[in-house]
Image: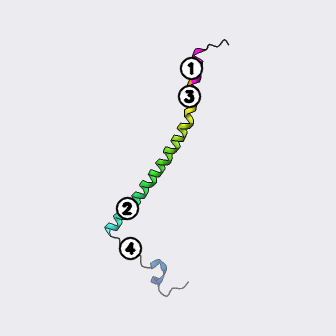
Amino acid sequence: MYYPSLFQHPFFAPTRVIVVSEERLQAAEREAKMQRLKAVDDRLAELREYRQTLAKELAPAEKVGKDLDQLDSGVECDV
């Protein structure tokens, strides 16, 4: 592609400068932190729910284990 002047090449195009007020920058940072906080809270809720599910699954197994321990303590084996 032919460019009549070296400085008309897209490489030399003027850079874009975006000016943001300090208040808007702080508001954007606060919003980003609030979104991260919500994501962490959501993940914690998922983990608590998963923990409760596992605890419910383990509760019957612990009871069975205790019952078997009681049986083992009172019985002698002749083998």
Residue behind mark 2: 29
Kind of residue sitting beneath label 2: Glu
Kind of residue sitting beneath label 4: Ile
The local secondary structure at tag 3 comes to helix
Q: Verify CB contact (< 8 Å) between mark 1 and mark 4.
A: no
Q: Residue 63 carries which label?
A: 3
**Which quadrant is home to the N terminus?**
bottom right
Position of 40 with respect to 25 (left or right) is right
Q: In which quarter of the image is residue 35?
A: bottom left
**x and y percent of residue 2 in the render?**
54, 85
Q: Which of 55 and 13 is in front in this view?
A: 55
Q: Residue at x 49, y 88 (%)?
A: 4
Residues under labels 1 and 4: Cα distance? Answer: 75 Å
Mark closer to the chain start, 2 or 3: 2
**x and y percent of residue 54 in the render?**
54, 39
Residues under labels 3 and 4: Cα distance? Answer: 66 Å
Q: What stretch is highlighted in magenta?
A: 67-78
Position of 22 with respect to 6 (left or right) is left
Residues under labels 4 and 2: Cα distance? Answer: 17 Å
Q: Does the magenta stretch include residue 72?
A: yes
Asked which colour scheme the image uses, the reply is: rainbow
Pointer 4 local density, CA inside 10 Å: few below 14, some 14–19, many at least 20: few
Pointer 3 local density, CA inside 10 Å: few below 14, some 14–19, many at least 20: few
Residue behind mark 4: 18
Position of 24 with respect to 3 (left or right) is left
Kind of residue sitting beneath label 3: Lys
Q: Closer to the camera: disc 3 or disc 4?
A: 3
Kind of residue sitting beneath label 1: Gln
Q: Closer to the camera: disc 1 or disc 4?
A: 1
Q: Verify CB contact (< 8 Å) between mark 3 and mark 1.
A: no
Majority secondary structure in the magenta region: helix
Residue behind mark 1: 70
